[in-house]
Image (cartoon, helix red, strand yellow):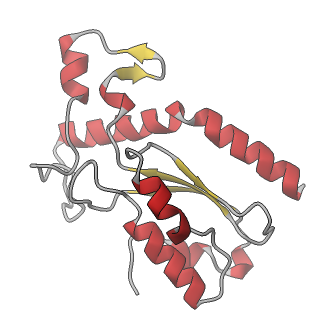
């Protein structure tokens, strides 16, 4: 069983990590394709190795009805041994329209910089590339920074709930 998220290393009991920010840069067919393949494989690995992991498979049908989001929260509130996973797939959603959270893009250069597809009709962001053109790297870097900042309230909320439950 192989997959593109490093959970086997991180889920070892001696590490005792219970809160994960997961950034998945795995390839998908289209920008609108559901981004859960690697997370499902992680769940399968955890089940095979009897390691606590939030239920992903049971939520896929519900999540597949929605457009791809910048951030997903997976947790099992009733299970204190189960880690919280905040999952950030590659998605150019709000970044396309905002230069910072709540700050609309104004100039043509700003709009052109953010107007790109990740998986469709391009190899600019392919995971098999070892060297990326500067523009591709800059776009990906700024987009992921934006996606985290755009979801900082979710991160803070989940950290606060986590802290209240365990400390």
- Residue 154 vs 31, above or below: the answer is above
Residue 98 x %, y %: 37, 21
Q: Quadrant of residue 79?
A: bottom right
Q: Quadrant of residue 135?
A: top left
**Residue at the location (32% across, 15% down)?**
105
Judge whether residue 5 can be spotted in this image.
Answer: no
Residue 131 x %, y %: 19, 55
Q: Is residue 163 left or right of residue 128?
A: right
Query: Where, quadrant-wise, is the N terminus in this rendering?
Result: bottom left
Residue 106 x %, y %: 29, 9
Name the residue furthest right. 167
- Residue 140 vs 58, above or below: the answer is above
**Residue at the location (78% across, 43% down)?**
160
Q: Is residue 94 left or right of residue 80?
A: left
Residue 103 x %, y %: 43, 14
**Residue at the location (20% across, 57% down)?**
126
Q: Quadrant of residue 37?
A: bottom left
Name the residue furthest left. 121
Q: Is residue 15 left or right of residue 126?
A: right
Judging depth in this view, the residue of 52 and 131 nearest the camera is 52
**Residue at the location (44% across, 76% down)?**
41
Q: Is residue 111 left or right of residue 158?
A: left
Q: How many marks?
A: 0
Judge whether residue 8 can be spotted in this image.
Answer: yes
Query: Where, quadrant-wise, is the C terminus in this rendering?
Result: bottom right
């Amino acid at each position: 069983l192989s997959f593109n998220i490093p959970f086997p290393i991180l889920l070892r009991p001696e590490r005792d990590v219970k809160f994960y920010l997961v950034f998945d840069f795995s390839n998908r067919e289209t920008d609108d394709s559901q981004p859960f393949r690697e997370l499902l494989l992680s769940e399968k690995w955890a089940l095979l190795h009897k390691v606590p992991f939030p239920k992903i498979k049971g939520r896929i049908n519900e999540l597949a009805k929605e457009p791809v989001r910048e951030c997903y929260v997976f947790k099992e509130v009733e299970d204190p041994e189960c880690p919280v996973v905040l999952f950030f797939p590659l998605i150019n959603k709000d970044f396309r329209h905002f230069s910072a959270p709540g700050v609309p893009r104004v100039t043509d250069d700003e709009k052109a910089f953010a107007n790109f597809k990740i998986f469709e009709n391009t190899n600019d962001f392919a995971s098999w590339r070892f060297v990326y053109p500067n523009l591709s790297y800059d776009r990906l870097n700024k987009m992921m920074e934006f996606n985290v900042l755009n979801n900082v309230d979710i991160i803070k909320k989940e950290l606060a709930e986590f802290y209240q439950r365990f400390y």
